[in-house]
Image (tube, rainbow, N blue to C red):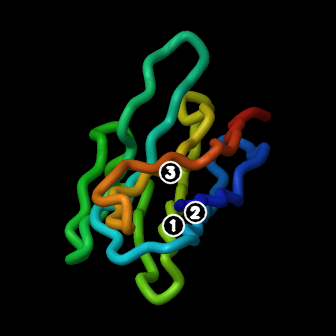
Amino acid sequence: QVQLVESGGGLVQPGGSLRLSCAASGSIFRLNTMAWYRQAPGKPRELVAGITSGGSTNYTDSVKGRFTISRDNAKNTVYLQMNSLNAEDTAVYYCNIDAVTWRGRNDYWGQGTQVTVSS
């Protein structure tokens, strides 16, 4: 089984920064795409950023130029550096990984970490 542990959320003032981390553990043969999603109250979950095993990245338009996704394959960890945060970034952030284990290829989700941007 695969476990995802997220950290780094919290309360930050507008214009501030946070760095989210998501570490994967378990019997992982290969990590494919790793991504961050978020869900604000009353809104559907949306993809924020993704990074492939080769390092290619994609971002939703609203975070381009402010957020940076990266990964450390040796640590099975994905990061999300968030700068110039504003109130619209307030949400629960979830990491998602596409991983191959002995069970085959599956999607796995973290437990979520709250990010609140407020003065």
Name the residue: 75% across, 46% down.
12
Mark closer to the chain start, 1 or 2:
2
Question: Left or right of 32: which side holds 90?
Answer: right
Are discs 1 and 2 less than 8 Å apart at CB?
yes
Question: Left or right of 63: which side holds 26?
Answer: right
Image location of residue 20, percent across then percent down: 61, 60
Mark in front: 3 vs 1: 3
Image location of residue 108, percent across then percent down: 46, 50
Q: Amino acid at mark 2?
A: Cys
User: Taking 33 as reference, is 37 above or below it?
Assistant: above
As rendered, which of 29 and 65 lies closer to the eye? 29
Cα distance in 3D space between marks 3 and 2: 6 Å
Question: Left or right of 37: which side holds 9?
Answer: right
Mark in front: 1 vs 2: 2
Residue 35 falls in which quadrant of the image? bottom left
User: Mark 2 sits on what residue?
Assistant: 22
Residue count near mark 2 (Cα–Cα under 10 Å), binned few <14, some 14–19, many ≥20 = many
Mark closer to the chain start, 3 or 1:
1
Cα distance in 3D space between marks 1 and 2: 6 Å
User: Taking 101 as reference, is 38 above or below it?
Assistant: above
Name the residue: 29% across, 49% down.
59
Residue 67 falls in which quadrant of the image? bottom left
User: Mark 1 sits on what residue?
Assistant: 79
As rendered, which of 118 and 55 lies closer to the eye? 55
Q: Which mark is residue 95?
A: 3
Image location of residue 96, percent across then percent down: 44, 50
As rendered, which of 83 and 54 lies closer to the eye? 54
Q: Amino acid at mark 1?
A: Tyr
Are discs 3 and 2 less than 8 Å apart at CB?
yes
